[in-house]
Amino acid sequence: MPLTQDLEQILDLVLPTDPSFRRIEPAMIDSCIRDARHHAVEGSKEAFLFSAMRLLALPDNGHTRLIPNDSISVLPLRFVSVGAGVQLTGPASETTAPRGELIAVNGTAWEQIEAAAATFLAGTRQRKRVIGPLLLAWPYALARLGFSSGKNTTEYRVKAEDGQITDFELENAHTVPASMLYPRNEHGKADPCWRPERFAEIKDWQGLGLSIVLPSFFDPGESALQMAISDAAEHVRAYPNKNILIDIRGNTGGDFLRTMPLIDAISENTSRRVVMLVDKFTFSAAIVFVAILNYRLGRRLTLIGEEMGDGLTFFAEGGLLDLPVSGAVVRYSSAFHDWENGTSSQTTPADIARYLVPAGKLTLDREWVGRPMAETAQEPFYQHVLRALND
């Protein structure tokens, strides 16, 4: 089947349905369509996918994008955005490469590559930093952006924690399926196969307070999340005078409606203080969770971490479109959400509109960035934060 079939599905379903495209000049859309069609007719899959990424990134909406992960191959390296930098968290099996901070690719500072890739990546600056590291391991993307080595290899420069700088190169033909190293919903963990063992991890730190880890709101089975949220709400109500730390870093979203019982339980006590840990991987429904608590708790909520992966005004809902020829996936939107001002539109689903609140700006009270290598060393930090909350 020709790649033009994939393009026609995008044109028939996504562009007419997705309201975020209504903000874009038709001439700009037409230009991107022509480019994608040219590569589709040629039968060049990677060129078509890259052009389709540009088309779907036009609205700068993080919920609308082409996800190439299931249809491309990349060099066996996992890059993850950490703070304002990029870390090589580890290679695939049977590949030798040093872990550490990425400095350059093919002799070019990675920041320059990031800037050149911006128009192919959807969403805010932070969202682009979440999904962008995939391009650093994709030889075709590096070449298309103008940063190939000129040889059949890709060269990397990495700085280890001790400051040692290492240069190494990999053969461009030595690739693995991208989905092995880059999950569709990028969570930022060093292990690309990470899955939450439970939807809520609760711990009582005795005199300091409670900690609740909420790693995801996406539950295909539709019952485990609901049970975990109910259990967390019961714990919160059982200790009405305890302050709470909520860690929602790496939570890429799901169904915020199922988290409302926990939000209600946390909000019931008017003297309780809450601290929330967030990062650039906090996205979609997870940001809504933060927004509602920010509205209800006001100054009793402290936000620690880094700017999240989206603002409070965005397009969402919609669905996923599997492209039958290339094997890529398109994420598209169908509804407008305005959690900053608490206003809805005719596209906002009624069950979501009833919870819309004017949450205002979500401003960090303290900037802090954790490292993916330190995923098991959270408990001392939790204790430190809760202790400061009680002072």
Image: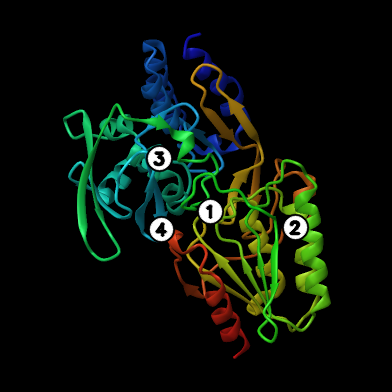
Q: Which residue is nearer to you in this view: 135 or 17?
A: 135
**On the image, numbered disc 1 is attached to which residue?**
310
Give the structural element (helix, strand or loop) at label 4.
strand
**Quadrant in the picture for residue 356:** bottom right
Q: Residue 384: in sight, yes or no?
A: yes
Q: Earlier in the sequence, mark 2 or mark 3?
A: 3
Q: Nearer the viewer, mark 3 or mark 4?
A: 3
Q: Which amino acid does the dot numbered 2 rest on? A: Thr
Q: Which amino acid does the dot numbered 1 rest on? A: Asp
Q: Which amino acid does the dot numbered 4 rest on? A: Val
Q: Earlier in the sequence, mark 4 or mark 1?
A: 4
Q: Which mark is residue 259?
A: 2
Asked if the residue under mark 4 is in contact with the one under mark 2, i.e. CB atoms within 8 Å, the reply is: no
Question: How many residues crowd mark 1 within 10 Å: few (<14), some (14–19), many (20+)?
Answer: many
**Quadrant in the picture for residue 14:** top right
Q: Which amino acid does the dot numbered 3 rest on? A: Ser
Residue 44 place in picture, x, y as percent:
37, 17
Q: Nearer the viewer, mark 1 or mark 3?
A: 3
Give the structural element (helix, strand or loop) at label 2.
helix
Question: How many residues crowd mark 3 within 10 Å: few (<14), some (14–19), many (20+)?
Answer: few
**On the image, numbered disc 3 is attached to which residue?**
93
Q: Residue at x 56, y 68 (%)?
A: 277
